[in-house]
Image: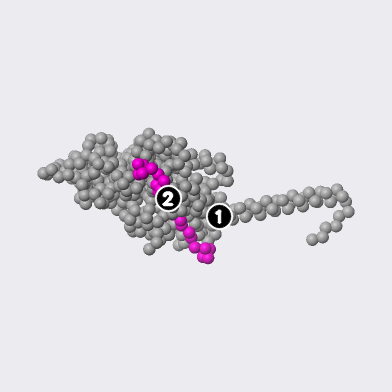
Amino acid sequence: MFIFVTDSRFCEMKTKQLVSMVLMVCLLAGCHCREKENQALPIGVFDSGTGGLTVLEKILTLDAFDNAKGVQTPDGVPDFVAEDFQYLADQANMPYGVYDAQGNAALLRRLVLDDARFLLGDRYCTNAAETQPTGKKAPCKILVIACNTATAYGLEDVRAMLDSLGGGTKVIGVINAGVKATLDALEGESEPFAVGVLATPGTISSGAYERTLRAEIAARTIQTPVTIVNQAGYGFAEAVDSEPDYVNPAQTAPRESYRGPRLGTADPDIKEELLDVYNFEPDGLLYRSVGPLKLDLQLNSAANYARFNLVSLVERHRASGSRAPLKAIILGCTHYPFLLETLWRTVEELRGYQRDGAYPYRDLLPENLAFIDPARYVAIECYCALQEDGLLKAASAAQPRSVKGFISVPAASLDPACRTGEGALTFEYKYGRPSSIEDTGTRVVPFSDDNIDANNRTRIRALLPACARELFSE
């Protein structure tokens, strides 16, 4: 291009305009390049263990949008087909639901922040012996907290950290998604009803679900009376993740290290008068036989933990005197959907349970009862957040999706006195560490057959095929 000028003022004016235009083009080009770079980054998902894979499975398989048009209409193609993922299971420090009960909620919040920092970072340890991470990875463009307890205690802390860092990275939690899913499912109910919340003790004690439910009910101006029944899932998540203090298939008799429910009269206890209601599976029980008596009864299967906690929820509702039918039960822990089949079977048994010629649970468990898994709503919220920020990755058959799994394990250098015989963190060390501790005694390493329990791998392969296909070797 040739420009001929004769007026110096005109030349000066045009030069300033040209410089401004060039700077603007460079700025826009830089923004476009950064946007493209950010689009290529993975989505980060974390949980206290492998339970959050139930959320990742919904994200990997979601088909709620037309990928070409961006509207919420299924098109037969997974919505995240082009996206890369990183999943973090903080297995060494789980279960998160116990920290508050042990008076150490500050450490729980620290762990949640550490999870977020790991996914935002670009390093990982290649093995448990490393003192400094040498593995390289990409930072994540959005975070999904696939853990109800972590959401209840750490969501706002993570948001504050992201705000302080700048860059506009978003974080999504599961509790709001679960509440919206529940009330959407019950929209139009004209008679009083009840909603059950089955979650970890930490999530229940935080009050996060009840507060969020009440706020959403008020926001939707729902006039129908709603009863909320909260039930702490004692040992449920731990059993699903095969924590040895809660389940141990190698055991054939009661053990000293057991931390699950016992026979008693307190809230976390197995009630003797309800033994026929729980209808425990015999293979998942440990006890000492003294004549016809079963002493030192201990649960020893995830299925029996599911039965115990669901019966406890329904019995709590019945004992309150409320006659409002349970129209929905929120599975407020990502580990619980693994036992959905057992939960449904227990509901059917409770409907048919008879005592003294009466059916004490039948009217409380209507045929249209729904178990609510928040995971699908989390997946939709994640898609919308990326779409809004222009961070969805363009589909390309030439670039197959990458899903990388990471898991925390005890550090090789950790004092043996802080580890159990199975190599896990001892209960005392895990929950007794100060939140200010510089080294928590764990390392984050890639998933492998050595650090994922065999029972978990079997369950994941059976129930979460997309995750199994992406994360595990055949």
Reading the image, the residue beneath label 1 is 39
Q: Could one spot residue 379 in this view of the protein?
A: no
- Range of the magenta residues? 396-419
Horizontal and vertical percent for residue 271?
22, 39
Q: Nearer the viewer, residue 138 or 57?
A: 138
Horizontal and vertical percent for residue 101?
35, 36
Q: For residue 402: magenta? A: yes
Q: Residue furthest top?
A: 103
Q: Could one spot residue 253 in this view of the protein?
A: yes
Where on the picture, by quarter, is residue 105?
Answer: top left
Q: Nearer the viewer, residue 250 or 228?
A: 250
Instruction: Determine crowd level at label 2: few under 14, some 14-19, many 20+ residues with C-alpha closer than 10 A.
Output: some
- Horizontal side of 241 relative to 3 (left or right) equals left
Residue at position x 20%, y 41% in the image: 296
Estimate the spatial distance between the alpha carbons at disc 2 and disc 1, rounded to whole Å.
Answer: 32 Å
Secondary element at image label 1 = helix
Q: Which mark is residue 128?
A: 2
Where on the picture, by quarter, is residue 256?
Answer: top left
Q: For residue 453: magenta? A: no
Q: Nearer the viewer, residue 326 or 87?
A: 87
Residue at position x 34%, y 38% in the image: 428
Quadrant that contains the C terminus? bottom left
